[in-house]
Amino acid sequence: MPEPHPPDAGPRTGAASDPAGPVLAAERAHLTESRAALGRMRTHTAGLTATGADRVATEHLKQLLYRRMKALEDDPGVPLFFGRLDYDRHLGAEADETLYIGRRHVTSEAGAEPLVIDWRAGMALPFYQARPGAPMQVRRRRRFGFSHGALTAYEDEDLVRPAPTEPDAGSQILESEIERPRTGPMRDIVATIQPEQDSIVRAELSQSLCVQGAPGTGKTAVGLHRAAYLLYAYREQLGRSGVLVVGPNDSFLSYIADVLPALGEIDATQATVQSLVSEANGVAVRGVDEPAVAVLKGDARMATVLRNAVWSHLGRATEPLVVPRGAYQWRVGGYLADEIVAELVARGVRYESGRAMLAQRLAHQVLLRMEAAGDSPDDRVQAAVARSRPVAAYAAALWPGLTPARLLLRLLSDPDLLARSAEGVLSAEEQASLRPTRPARTAAAARWTLADVVLLDEVADLLTRTPSLGHVILDEAQDLSPMMLRAVGRRASTGSVTVLGDLAQATTPWATRSWAESLGHLGQPDAVIEELVAGFRVPGAVIDFAARLLPRIAPSLTPPHSVRRHRGELDLRRRARTDDALVEAVAAALEREGTVGLVVADADVGRTHRLLTGRDLAHGLLGETAQSFESRLDLVPATLAKGLEFDHVVLLEPAKIVAGEPDEVTGLRRLYVCLTRAVSSLVVVYADPLPDLLAA
């Protein structure tokens, strides 16, 4: 291949008179060959027939072929590769070879030579981690520029040269890709992963991580790419145990839904805390708690109250067990039955497991007496005795069956049961606040709140152990209550977690105060805490403006900084009448390339929606249901802005966003979230004075 241009010459486009033209022509030929090879791989897979030894095996093979077909789908608008590494044997490599780095592995027609290697492969690591002075056996790293899937430019970096003594200008292609305007949902960042992000992505499966990430640092993308990496590196293990991604709401899940499939992974499950606990317990959320009540129900002390309530149902024997069998009656003393119950409780078994074991233990005592009398009973006799009516009735009296919904309804409605269960844990005032003013007569008629369903999930786990997954990615974790964290954590009790969040963006009344506290509730106290403060998406002018709030909302955090060359645009527009100014700002943003988000206080959503409609500004309205993000303009309630990004943001009345929360700190945190959704420009339209920290 022809020698590339000098590294400091900037991206080359391959114009007719440009010496880079032959280089680009060769690279484009490789792209064409790679696309043809991917098509052959998919055609070959489509021609395979799933035939197993039985129906179950056949269905399993069909699922494998389906996943393989999805992984081999080609999107002509997305480049098959975005980088290249030139390994050099003089630097310790096994051979001089060129490897192209892309989203999936593509092999030649013969199947021997890789045309593209998966970005997650070990040989791709230098693309993200190598640097001058530490080349990792690579002589040259090449980045490619693309437009609508067509290769348009390339840029080389000489990794053999000495490490620079001063920061260099960086990669123009990398910067252009980071700042490229977007449309639709979130896209992957596989071509732009930075070294500190890559270290998190490639951490061992056994290592639980907590990523404290400022706005624009890519923490959500890092978490999703970590899921993709783990599914690649530990496919057999995670294929059995599973990967779960937990996000804050359905709009957020819709926004990130395309990232993993774009990386060839469709096996990860996505859920919110609400959908997770609702589906697991077969109960829909139909009510809303007052904030103070929700905070109390989410308090970790409720775990002790529920545990006390469950185990308080155990009884004591008041008479011996008598089992008629044939001409004999076999007796087991009540004191022995109490000892069996105490021994099972001491073992720490789940409630339902102990209940099943109790009948077997009682039956065993009967068999011991039968053997002492000269009989020779076997296991079948013990099983029959355990199922007999006298044993079943006796065991049920000592260890009655429970259901989560009935138990929780009774606990919240029965002052005596609540008082016994909460003694020394909750005050009398707190107990009174938990009791509904009009208790439901049955569990089916109850209007369960989200906090209630989380409590139901806790009770269900006390009764029967919740199955554990191999890995859980938890985003916006700072907004979860201790009981919510416990609900997520029990689904990784034998696995690991990647926790993502920002304490400065904590906006719920029950939000965490520290990551150490949250990790304790998750059952992952040994997780490593990483902090990301380099902003790649939010421009400097915007992040510096928003960071003025940090001394009030999160004084312990390191202030973020933007690493982008361009500062972006910040425009503060104070007007006595905001309607015309708002429409003007939105219309101007729509004339530019990229998406536009209009962020308003929740109380202003209806009025703003009518204003946009009346001015013929087509827009989407984000809500709690899943969104397609197909509109160029989205009207975004402030409470749903978290986790989203738009090329251009117009924000209406910061003071109203702050006032929409129960206290000033929470309101300022909500505003911090809303201010940092912009990738290129932010226009703030307001009539009411700005918060003092922003006005300074």
Image (cartoon, grey):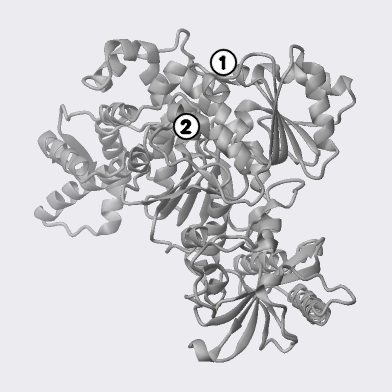
Residue identifier under label 1: 659
Mark 1 vs 2, N-terminal side? 2
Q: Residue at x 61, y 74 (%)?
A: 53
Q: Residue at x 61, y 31 (%)?
A: 674
Identify residue type, mark 2: Leu
Residue 328, picture quadrant: top left
Residue 378 appearing in the image: yes
Residue identifier under label 2: 550
Residue 95, picture quadrant: bottom right
Q: Position of residue 27 (x, y in %)?
A: 77, 78
Q: Is residue 37 above or below residue 353?
A: below
Asked whether, in this view, residue 447 is left or right of residue 387, the answer is: right
Numbered badge on residue 353: none
Asked whether, in this view, residue 563 is left or right of residue 420, the answer is: right
- Secondary-structure class at tag 1: helix
Residue 83 appearing in the image: no
